[in-house]
Image (spheres, grey):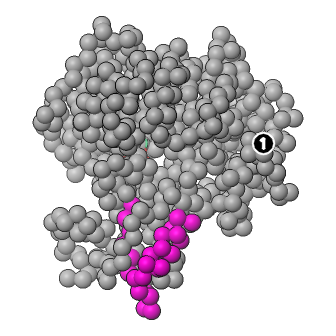
Amino acid sequence: MIEGYPEIARDVASLKRAPNLGDWAALRESFSWDDMWAELDTPGGLINMAHECIDRHANGANADKPAIIWQAADDHVETYTYGDFKRQSNKVANALKGLGIEKGERVFILSDRIPELYFSCFGILKIGAIMAPLFSAFGPEPIKERVARAEGSVIITTPKLLPKVNAIRSQLPSVRHVIVIAHREGATVAPEDIDYASIVDPASEEFEVERTGAEDWSVMHFTSGTTGLPKGAAHVHNAIVGHYATGKYALDLQPDDIYWCTADPGWVTGTSYGMFAPFSNGVTALIDEAGFAARRWYRLIQDHRVTVWYTAPTAIRLLMRSGESLPAQFDLSSLRFVGSVGEPLNPEAVVWGNRVFEQPILDNWWQTETGSIMCANYPSQPVRPGSMGRPFPGVHVTVVDDEGNELTEPAAEGALVVQPPWPSMFRTYWNDQERYDSRFKNGWYYTGDRAKRDEDGYIWFVGRDDDVINTAGHLVSPFEVESVLIEHPAVAEAGVIGKPDEVAMEVVKAFVTLNEGHSETPELMRELNRHCRDRLGPAVAPREIAVIDILPKTRSGKIMRRLLKARELGLPEGDTSTLEED
Ligand code: PRX
């Protein structure tokens, strides 16, 4: 327990709803993934994520139930039922087939949160192709790296985002088609591109979903590493069993819920929990096209009577900053579950939630690689503010020492590991099997995080084991930023760190040394900032760039980011025995 933050008891009888998970220990005993699989519709052992999420509902009693309530940035609302969703995704599937796209090909989506993004996602899955979303705030460079690494065949985008694709298109020989969703922007489409409406509108509403098996590829998300460029974590259709089960027991989704996940589908939370968990559970999902704004968010909860809300610590900290009189102006009484993921959730945020939403915010933990929630706080269980909760039934999450032995002593710190396999576990890093294999050792999957486990099995996040930066819940690879910086003629070398930030947890900070003939002028600094924003986009570009005389490096020439960080924070420099400049 963190001092000053006592456990918050939960009285099941007084919850607004009887939760799906009544007793954690009992479900842990009785849980079986086979039972979860059996709750889905898997004819002859075949499983397709789009069928589980859409067609099985559209073919049954949920045909006329809203799947998506879309709140446009201009505040008009469009509602699509499961039946509509089936027809629209069938049309996309037929259109893609018409272009000759085959099972296993990688189809990228670079789009803001508009309904066509969701139709496309499931159309891609229906033909058995691999759905690979990109964050719309990426610049051309991160887009190029990801599409090139996965040898993508198609990019589906919008007129607004198309210039970023055009900037790197000549460097992407694998891309056969760029499909532009033009009608919402009233734009015309260049002859070399394909207008989404021109192929989707005339396509048939009937489609027979590809007969994918449990181990066929489904989704690829890119995740950041310390040393190399982002890696494509590839998932299989069987992952839906994990999305379904965690939607049911960790997010407590129930049939009449109005569910809102605020994450963008460019990141894994926005697919696993923005689409797959809610739709496989047959609930109605609210999708907001716009970004964060405290007043707007409270209004959406009130107007749509949101019941289950899954968001992130950065947003919660921003809400906390906007004060308590703001939420008091709205009727938030529909909320019965508030969840958080992506970064450590401060204990004070849990307590704040308990005041403002009359319930503690439930933190949970997982990763791109794990595909679904591995460890969670549940509505029926006592909440220990600052803890990520306890393992999801059916997965063994624990803390181990350097040899891979489970640490049994309470509060001992070690590597956070998960015992493989589980349904939504990633199956490879695309074209980098060696790196994938390196994540599995001593019978564990190593998450790259460090944690502690208390005597009751609650897990407490300690930190990452690497230099990957977590800014507002988005992982950024320092290497990716450094690579773009050193492409600038003035920059000799670059070292990039996560600088602690009160709201975003970390922001990207770059240190550079300059080439002969260049000096630190305001013009150069503006130019460097522009270079990074143009190439990397606002999601990845450094917030701060500082010029220094010399970058600390090991004798083998590796930049010591750890030391840069310690110096930035005025902390002890630790072991510098391998430092070159000594
Ligand atoms: O370091 C952990 C942090 O985010 C990482 C996973 O990021 P990503 O692969 O982008 O997946 C996003 C889906 C959640 C983790 O290795 N992280 C995630 N959740 C938490 C967290 N750190 C602390 N507390 C959490 N609840």
Magenta span has 489? no
Picture quarter containing residue 51? top right
Determine the residue positioned at 68% across, 18% down: 58
Determine the residue positioned at 72% across, 57% down: 175
Determine the residue positioned at 67% across, 35% down: 115
Label 1 sits on what residue type?
His
For disc 1, does the CB lie below 8 Å from ligand 1?
no
Q: Quadrant of the N terminus?
A: top left
- Which quarter of the frame holds ligand 1? top left
Q: Which residues are magenta?
A: 508-534
Q: For mark 1, what is the residue?
A: 183
Magenta span has 527? yes
Side of 561 relative to 134 (left or right): left
Q: In the depicted view, which residue is nearer to us: 355 or 457? A: 355
Query: Residue 232, image x and y in percent?
Result: 53, 52
Side of 582 relative to 97 (left or right): left
Q: In the depicted view, which residue is nearer to us: 510 or 186? A: 186
Query: Residue 84, image x and y in percent?
Result: 72, 23
